[in-house]
């Protein structure tokens, strides 16, 4: 899975812990979406950004 082009978020790793406390590896992936944004000069760009950053990007407008 790729990382966010704006924030650099990438998959994080950890353990699944069962009721008997056995640990197995697992991965949490960020919610990455490909969107088209318009920058200040009016150019369109396709970027892969996380949805949490997408919310803050449109919150400032």
Image (tube, grey):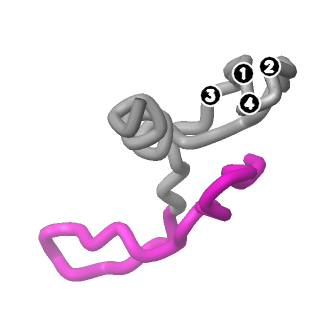
As measured in the structure, the alpha-carbon distance from the residue carrying label 2 to the one carrying label 1 is 6 Å
Question: Height in image: 61 above or below 16?
Answer: above
Callout 1 crowding tier (Cα within 10 Å): few <14, some 14–19, many ≥20: few
> What x and y, as percent, mark residue 13?
53, 72
Residue 33, labelled with which disc? 3
Q: Which residue is mark 4?
A: 39
Observer-side mark, 2 or 1, equals 2
Callout 3 crowding tier (Cα within 10 Å): few <14, some 14–19, many ≥20: few
Question: Height in image: 19 above or below 59?
Answer: below
Q: Are marks 2 and 4 in contact (CB under 8 Å)?
A: yes
Residue 38, labelled with which disc? 1
> What x and y, as percent, mark residue 41?
81, 28
Q: Quadrant of the C terminus?
A: top left
Task: In this rendered view, identify the residue nearer to me: 22 or 46.
Answer: 46
As measured in the structure, the alpha-carbon distance from the residue carrying label 2 to the one carrying label 4 is 5 Å
> What x and y, as percent, mark residue 30?
52, 48
Residue 11: quadrant of the picture: bottom right
Read off the magenta span: 1-26
Callout 2 crowding tier (Cα within 10 Å): few <14, some 14–19, many ≥20: few
From the viewer's perspective, is 8 left or right of 24? Answer: right
Q: Are marks 1 and 4 in contact (CB under 8 Å)?
A: yes
As measured in the structure, the alpha-carbon distance from the residue carrying label 1 to the one carrying label 3 is 16 Å
Observer-side mark, 1 or 3, equals 1
SS state under label 1: strand
Q: Residue at x 73, y 18 (%)?
A: 36
From the viewer's perspective, is 33 left or right of 16? Answer: right
Q: Main secondary structure of the magenta part?
A: loop
Question: Height in image: 22 above or below 35?
Answer: below
* Label 1 or label 3, whichever comes before in sequence order: 3
SS state under label 4: loop
């Amino acid at each position: 899975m790729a990382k966010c082009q704006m924030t650099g978020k990438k998959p994080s790793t950890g353990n699944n812990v069962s009721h008997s406390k056995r640990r197995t590896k697992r991965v949490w992936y960020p919610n990455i979406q490909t969107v088209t944004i318009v920058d200040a000069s009016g150019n369109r760009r396709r970027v892969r950004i996380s949805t949490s950053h997408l919310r803050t990007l449109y919150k400032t407008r």
